Image (cartoon, grey):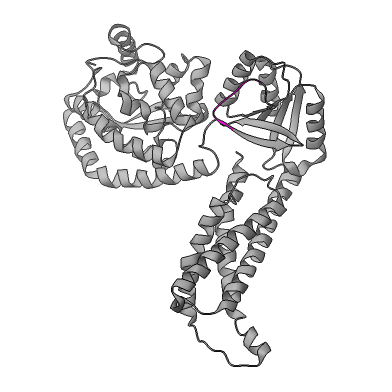
């Protein structure tokens, strides 16, 4: 999903809200027309303040119905007339709800003219505003290339040639073909991606084997590339089916954390991060004082470099639970000795296999550090990482660069979303799990994310941190 599509998609909500309120105010302003035309007195007098309160109360219902009708899809390639018809249907549904409500409680409102004119004006205003907003988005797409999806086509049959012609002749569709290759060679695809970039791959060659398709799918998911294909024998439970130019196309869905999913998750993170900072501030102050009392030679909060979304480096904030002389930090005057000592401990005491390590009975911990690390209190400062935006409340754990270097290629799928303070692996065994099990749990989370999923994981984390780790 392009950033411009997310911006215009989010912008659509306040625009619709404003248009609906404007339509209601216009209907109120012209409410005297029937009486003027009929040359008769008005039979009612409804205060504007009361009317405005009703309008502001009802407008969110419009937005909710619009969302249920799919009017907030974040793609620039929306068909205008289909969207206009959907606006008419959704607005008419709200009209029916209002009519039923007024029938049950007539004293709420009595002007049928305002209701009918408001309905027609809401449809007109919303459709016009959407047309203008979509025109602006299309202008940026065609003239500035903002929001264009760079697509690589694989195959040389008649279907792919027809699709290629459509993409070239209709720039407003939002696609720019960066290549049309005969095979699914990952090496060849990597070269094209490095030179021109790739946002989507469409496979149109039924002779490509399932094994080659699986490798191609792994590559697309690791690099956040949308993968679509004209259906062959390969099946999946995570797909959406569309029709393009008369041909069915199946798109693999990497994660719901795209478009509105990303917006909702970020909003949840901001609220949860603020609550976490406020709720745990007294505990964090006590921990900081205890750390400084036991080992005053180093900082209270330890910044540890990790790799986050798309492999970008950032600093994870943690309470220091080791003696400062043993911390792997370049500000430590004993840095070289600390690195050498850690390598020795990993070799002798690590209880984990794979790219990650876990030192059992780590002798570098302070007494305070052992306690806060046991109950994951050392990770409380990561609420500030969440507010900054380089971490999420829930997601895969962030790993060090030296650990990521030992990843197998498919493990890099963990870097396609923001890392989290907690996650499925943490509530299922914390650091006691083998890395492959942790990977499978994190991939399940990536593929099946929902807001309720995040809430469930956060609640279960409370019980998980109270259980003693086996590998401490």
User: Image quadrant of residue 341?
Assistant: top left
- 78 is higher (above) or lower (below) than 417: below
The count of marks equals 0
Decide which of 194, 443 is in the foreground and name it: 443
Look at the image and tell me whether residue 400 can be seen.
Answer: no
Decide which of 140, 87 is in the foreground and name it: 87
- 449 is higher (above) or lower (below) than 55: above
Tell me what residue is drawn at x 37 percent, y 28 percent: 424
The image quadrant where one finds the N terminus is top right
Q: Which residue lies most toward the bottom here?
A: 40
Look at the image and tell me whether residue 178 can be seen.
Answer: yes
Q: Is residue 415 left or right of residue 36?
A: left
- Asked if residue 236 is among those painted magenta in the image, a careful observer would answer yes
Instruction: Decide whether the magenta segment is chiefly helix, strand or loop.
Output: loop
Decide which of 416, 349 is in the foreground and name it: 416
User: Image quadrant of residue 41?
Assistant: bottom right
Which span of residues is magenta-colored? 233-239
Q: Is residue 427 left or right of residue 167?
A: left
- 235 is higher (above) or lower (below) than 346: below
Question: Residue 221: image x %, image y %?
Answer: 56, 26
Question: Residue 12: image x %, image y %?
Answer: 59, 54
Decide which of 375, 244 is in the foreground and name it: 244
- Asked if residue 145 is among those painted magenta in the image, a careful observer would answer no
Question: Residue 472: image x %, image y %?
Answer: 23, 19
Tell me what residue is drawn at x 50 percent, y 37 percent: 257
User: Image quadrant of residue 35?
Assistant: bottom right
């Amino acid at each position: 999903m392009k950033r411009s599509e997310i911006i215009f998609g989010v912008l659509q909500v306040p625009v619709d809200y404003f248009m609906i309120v404007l339509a209601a105010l216009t209907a109120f302003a012209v409410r005297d027309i029937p009486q003027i035309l009929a040359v008769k007195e008005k039979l009612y007098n409804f205060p504007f303040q009361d009317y405005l309160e009703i309008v502001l109360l009802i407008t969110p219902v419009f937005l909710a119905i619009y969302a249920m009708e799919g009017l907030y899809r974040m793609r620039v390639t929306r068909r205008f007339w289909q969207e206009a018809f959907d606006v008419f249907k959704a607005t008419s549904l709200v009209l029916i709800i209002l009519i039923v409500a007024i029938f049950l409680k007539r004293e709420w409102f009595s002007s049928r003219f305002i209701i009918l004119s408001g309905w027609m004006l809401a449809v007109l205003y919303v459709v016009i505003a959407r047309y203008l907003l979509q025109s602006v988005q299309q202008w940026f797409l065609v003239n500035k290339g903002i929001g264009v999806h760079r697509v690589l086509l694989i195959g040389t049959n008649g279907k792919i040639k027809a699709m290629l012609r459509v993409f070239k002749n209709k720039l407003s569709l939002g696609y720019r073909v960066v290549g049309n290759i005969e095979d699914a060679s990952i090496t060849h695809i990597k070269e094209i991606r490095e030179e021109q970039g790739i946002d989507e791959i469409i496979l149109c060659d039924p002779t490509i084997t399932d094994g080659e398709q699986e490798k191609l799918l792994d590559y697309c998911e690791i690099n956040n590339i949308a993968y679509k294909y004209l259906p062959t024998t390969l099946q999946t439970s995570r797909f959406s089916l569309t029709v393009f130019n008369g041909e069915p196309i199946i798109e693999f869905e990497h994660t719901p954390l795209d478009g509105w999913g990303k917006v909702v998750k970020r909003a949840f993170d901001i609220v949860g991060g603020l609550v976490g900072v406020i709720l745990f501030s007294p505990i964090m102050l006590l921990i900081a004082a205890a750390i400084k009392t036991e080992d005053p030679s180093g900082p209270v909060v330890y910044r540890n470099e990790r790799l986050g979304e798309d492999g970008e480096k950032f600093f994870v904030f943690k309470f220091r639970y080791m003696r400062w002389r043993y911390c792997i930090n370049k500000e430590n005057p004993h840095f070289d000795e600390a690195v050498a000592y850690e390598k020795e401990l990993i070799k002798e005491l690590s209880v984990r296999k794979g790219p990650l390590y876990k030192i059992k009975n780590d002798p570098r911990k302070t007494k305070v550090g052992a306690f806060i690390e046991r109950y994951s209190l050392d990770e409380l400062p990561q609420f500030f990482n969440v507010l900054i935006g380089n971490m999420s409340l829930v997601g895969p754990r962030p790993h060090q660069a030296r650990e990521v270097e030992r990843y197998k290629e498919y493990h890099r799928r963990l870097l396609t979303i923001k890392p989290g303070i907690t996650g499925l692996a943490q509530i299922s065994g914390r650091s006691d799990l083998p890395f492959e099990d942790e990977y499978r749990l994190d991939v399940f989370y990536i593929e099946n994310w929902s807001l309720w999923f995040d809430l469930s994981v956060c609640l279960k984390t409370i019980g998980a941190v109270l259980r003693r780790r086996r590998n401490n």
